[in-house]
Amino acid sequence: MHVLMVAAENDALPNAKVGGVADVVRDCPKALVEKGLTVDVVIPDYGFDYLERHHIGVVHVPFAGQMQKLDVWKLAQSDEGVTQLLISHWEFSRHNGAVYCNDEPGRPFATDASKFALFNAAVCEALLKGLIRTPDVVHLHDWHSACVALLLKTDSRYKKLSHLFLAYTVHNLALQGIRPFKGDSSSLEAWFPSLGYNGERLCDPRYFDCFNPMRSAINLVDKVHLVSPTYCQEVLRPSDAEKGFFGGEGLEADLQAAYEQGRVVGILNGCEYPGMKLEDISLASLYQHAENALFQWMAKSPVLDSSYYIAHQRLLKFKTQPFSGPLVTSVGRLTDQKALLLRQPFDKGLVLDELCQRLKQHNGYMIILGSGDAELEQIMTSVMARQENLLFLKGYAHFVGEYMYHLGDLFLMPSSFEPCGISQMLAMRAGQPCLVHGVGGLRDTVEHHVSGFSFQGESLASQSYELVTSFSDALELKKSQPEQWCAICEQAKNARFTWQSVAEGYLSGLYQ
């Protein structure tokens, strides 16, 4: 069997990772090859001309009223059985290597939607021309590749490819890439003016004049994949933000229909074992890597960011003070998905303030690594200014994260929803138990009081209370029952979520 994976990210290439989808696209093809498959992976060329690669050919794509010329490349260095492909166009690489762009308010996804629509059209054209070999399965990832399904199933130009089996993985249902049908330079009819389509199947359920790429793919493909069994069930229910539940995000009716047709599967993502080997696993090494990262981030602007200044002052304090308490860590993008509970009001401050105060009773430190939403970044910075045992590092640095996984005593991941999650797997792999909200993939990977700690709650207020209570309970358990704590750490370290089992799930449930 031959599979073509189409995605926006791929961590097999440098600087082509933003989220967990990049890990999947990097690791899963290798596991599929071990099962006897061959895999091609194609992403846009964000500026990889410095890599050794071979020119396969040129495609001419009718797009937005013009004929666009794009180049197809094959990387020289690929894992056995896995071919890494790139498609080049000036539109893909004009943002200084950035995978995604942030548009001004009022035009969400505008730049990216146009960019990925062109990329998707080029993939279809390359398949039609034989520059990309015809697969048995086209495996699409998130909304960024949804227009491949749209074109293959509705555009007569690609009629000879309409029989191809399409699998679609939803990594994050909260991001759907919604754009207008018409009336905007970034709209479906602007991109593909001659396309005939059924608007009822493609429109957003909340905004009927808008095209929803994710909904379109869900309705057009042969199989829909959610990245954990629990999340697969959660998305069949409507979201209720006031109660702190995030489910189908408006697409629950389509997912329910697909589920009843037997087209929906829930397969947990995997993790590679063993992980990265570090030379000197010590707090001193972590602090040094953190300081190096801070200096690099500071150097990007002539104006000193207050977050970096406070973080550096806090880091200097951490480095000079003796420390023997628990180290609580957290690594991830700063979005409401990850941090909504941390910013909820609690007593006279926020939940994060309360966690720091409870941790202070155990002489502990907390280190949070991540960036994202500007408002959340400012909230984290403000709490850091108030709480002397919190270090917030606004950015991402790979080695800092790796050292945090290995050195932390308790990993904090109170996501409001989590399709699968990778950070908890990486922390567990390093022997660090996690405190998680029992939703999605977190529920499927962390077993309460066995391999970590989990909390629930029927509202934002109750979830906040349970988070704080569970946090205190976990710290108290570490202090008063060291043998049980060590057993939990060992269970976390021995837990296995392998790509081999994922590949088996793909073969038995997704690719047929």
Image (tube, rainbow, N blue to C red):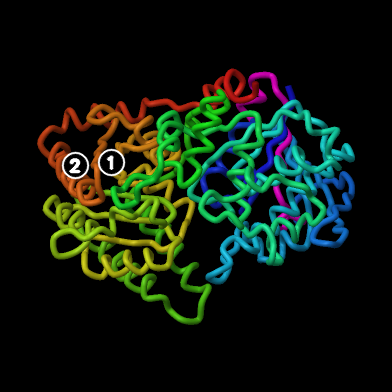
Q: Is residue 9 magenta?
A: no
Q: Nearer the viewer, residue 111 or 503?
A: 111
Q: Say which label, 2 or 1, has the lower sequence index.
A: 1
Q: Amino acid at mark 2?
A: Ser
Whole-percent x, y for residue 308 in the image: 39, 70
Measuring 60% from the left and 59% from the top, which residue is drawn there? Answer: 100
What number is the disc on residue 470? Answer: 2
Which residues are the magenta region? 30-49
What number is the disc on residue 435? Answer: 1
What number is the disc on residue 73? Answer: none
Q: Tell me which corner region of the image, top left, top right, bottom left or bottom right, holds residue 373.
A: bottom left
Measuring 34% from the left and 54% from the top, which residue is drawn there? Answer: 339
Whole-percent x, y for residue 20 in the image: 51, 44
Measuring 46% from the left and 72% from the top, which residue is drawn there? Answer: 298
Q: Secondary structure at mark 2?
A: helix
Q: Are marks 2 and 1 in contact (CB under 8 Å)?
A: yes
Q: Secondary structure at mark 1?
A: strand
Q: Amino acid at mark 1?
A: Leu
Q: Mark 1 Cα within 10 Å, few/some/many (few <14, many 20+)?
A: many
Q: Nearer the viewer, residue 104 or 35?
A: 104
Is 228 positioned to the left or the right of 93 in the image? left
Whole-number angstrom distance, CA of label 2 to CA of label 1 = 8 Å
